[in-house]
Amino acid sequence: MQKLLYLTHRIPYPPNKGDKIRSFHLLQYLSKRYRVYLGTFIDNEEDWQYENEIRKYCQDVCVVRLDPLSAKIKSLLALFGNDPLTLTYYRNTKLMQWVKAVSHTGSIQEAVIFSSAMAQYVEHLSDCRRIIDFVDVDSDKWRQYALSKSWPFNWVYHRESRRLLDYEKKVAEEFSYSTFVSKKEAELFQQLAPDAASKTTFFNNGVDTDFFSPTRDYPDPYPAGKKILVFTGAMDYWANVDAVNWFANSVFPAIHTKLPDVDFYIVGAKPVRQVQVLANQPGIHVTGAVEDIRPYLVHAAVAVAPLRIARGIQNKVLEAMAMQKPVVVSVQAMEGIHAVSGEELLVAENAMSFADQILFLLNSSEQATIGRAARDRVLRDYTWSANLSRIDPLLQSPIPAKV
């Protein structure tokens, strides 16, 4: 088998959060076709236990410790230069030397780069086939952050949005192909980077539908006699924090007033203080990390995804759909998901609409019907094997001629 260089900004295991889910399944797919050389970072001490697990898929692995505090300080110093803070945050001499050592013989003809931050490590490999999976248009995510923050953070985020977009465009023009998590995300980037539009495509995320199956016998984690609304996700991620705070304060009180037996569960690791305090409100529970997310999904009445800042495809929505749950999503969380509103999930445009949609589900017999339709949609359009196969022709394209 041919050698392939694969770089990720975070160890692609365990597949328990957005970027790790995609990066792991991509690694798993590539390992069946190539001898993979993986370069990656670990920014959470708990993840060191998974280093041997990830080596099972690779010919060689270079894992570098990344201290978030030191990386933030280093990246802030980049404000005095022209680079995006993202690049400085993930710049590391050890990983750069490893990449050069792996590639110096010329035997690496394919490189798959996961996220814009890692492209800096293969800028010198102009004679190999380089594919970057941007996943999302990160520069636009920073633009959205800037719109919701006050000075000086809005200035920093606006700067990052501009500088990162410049870098994304440069990478897209120089690399063989760029991929994104959805057609809509790819179309946005084609508008932002028209010179690379012909080399820009997408492959959707998938769901392990055998794992996320509603037919198994899962223990019920909820109190008897309660109807449960559930939100799942990493609770130290700002977009999730913003979503649950908005839902808890602007949507849930209207539901709880009419139906006091309804509880709202926030399920996810590392809840920040802003999330923890929500548990002081009537009917709201914050679990922190759980061993298995599936019981919390299958025994809930409705899953909610009230994100106001979102890019790409929300795995939390696909997983809930796979578990045959009716899901109420914001317009932003719906982006990139091909599903029929009103039949396979429900879309809410504002707080009142969110409350109305949830109350409709809780008071009707449509929950099961929408849940079955949701899983059917996932089975049709969101399996990993079908979606990842879209990368095969990209890896088989002609290697750029040396200049």
Image (tube, rainbow, N blue to C red):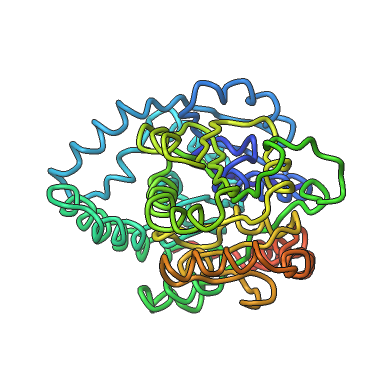
Q: Is residue 86 visible?
A: yes
Give the side of residue 49 with respect to residue 196, left or right: right
Give the side of residue 268 with respect to residue 375, left or right: left
Quarter holding the C terminus is: bottom left
Residue 154: x percent and y percent?
19, 54
Give the side of residue 186 with respect to residue 161, left or right: right
Task: Determine the residue positioned at 64% across, 66% down.
Answer: 361
Residue 331: x percent and y percent?
47, 70
Q: Is residue 401 visible?
A: no
Task: Determine the residue positioned at 60% across, 39% down.
Answer: 12
Task: Determine the residue positioned at 38% across, 34% down.
Answer: 277
Residue 364: x percent and y percent?
70, 68
Compare residues 330 and 234 and report the one nearer the observer: 330
Residue 167: x percent and y percent?
32, 58
Q: Relative to residue 199, is residue 89 depicted above or below? A: above
Q: Relative to residue 320, is residue 226 depicted above or below? A: above
Q: Relative to residue 155, is residue 222 depicted above or below? A: above
